[in-house]
Amino acid sequence: MKRTAELSDGLSPERRRRLVQVLFIFVNLALVETHLPGPLWLAVGGIFWLALVGITVAGSGLVCGTMCWIGAIQDIFEPFARPRIRLDARFGRAVVLALLLLWMPLGWLVMPELAAHDVTPIDLNLAWERHAFQFGLAALAATSVMFLGKRGLCRYLCPFNSVVAQIRKLVPRKTPRAVASSIACPPHSGGCSGCSRIAVTSATHERLSLI
Ligand code: SF4
């Protein structure tokens, strides 16, 4: 059955996943904010991210395996991955989480007039120089693998799976072992991809992420 699916469009599951990842890279980068969002976009973005946390808590590896542009770019540049630098993952993820939570309130404090009106985060102006910020972020994610290794940003700096792991501790459900065995790792070219499977417990996360 699986073989029939592969042959029907001539694409391997890995290649199909890569194509979807590329699509998500463009969608995500188009949505990246280059200005301070107002309360409406904070609410829309907040609900969206809570939904992503929710489906990952429920056991889906979709976010880290396919949807996240940071993970996708690191996967694409995986052949250049060299773990030259090791960081304190716990500290790095805590700092990034604090920054993610604080940049908007602090921005509103410094520029309160911006909190009063909402503008769409989707910039339909296609002039490339208007998107230098997004290109810069993509380049940063791509070059990160050359210093931090495969999925280094996920391992050292992204708090997403730490948040998922904390919520899992609060939500009684299947045992961690049962959850881990019920989630299939997304197909990738080998090694840990930083998907939700490593968020089952922080201890498991730490152990796997150091491989
Ligand atoms: S660990 Fe974070 S950066 Fe990495 S793929 Fe998941 S959400 Fe994206």
Image: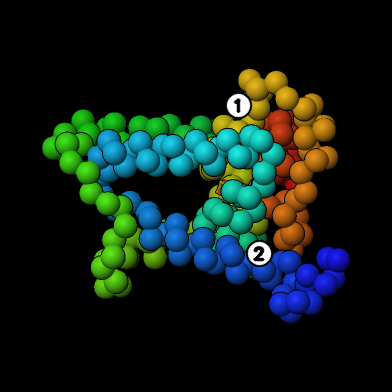
- Residue 211 location (% of width, % of height): 75, 47
Q: Residue at x 26, y 73 (%)?
A: 127
Q: Are marks 1 and 2 in contact (CB under 8 Å)?
A: no
The residue type indicated by label 1 comes to Ile
- In this view, 169 is above or below 113: above
Q: Quadrant of residue 183?
A: top right
Residue at mark 1 to residue at mark 2: CA–CA distance: 27 Å
The quarter of the image holding the N terminus is bottom right
Identity, as a three-letter code, of the amino acid under mark 2 = Arg
Q: Position of residue 54 (x, y in %)?
A: 58, 35
**Is 20 above or below relative to 63?**
below
Dot 1 lies on which element?
Answer: helix
Which residue is label 2 attached to? 17
Find out if the beta carbon at label 1 lies less than 8 Å from the nearest ligand 1 atom.
no
List x then y, in percent, for residue 6.
78, 72
Residue at the image position 51 percent from the left and 32 percent from the top: 94
At 63% from the left and 20% from the top, the residue drawn is 170
Q: Which mark is residue 167?
A: 1
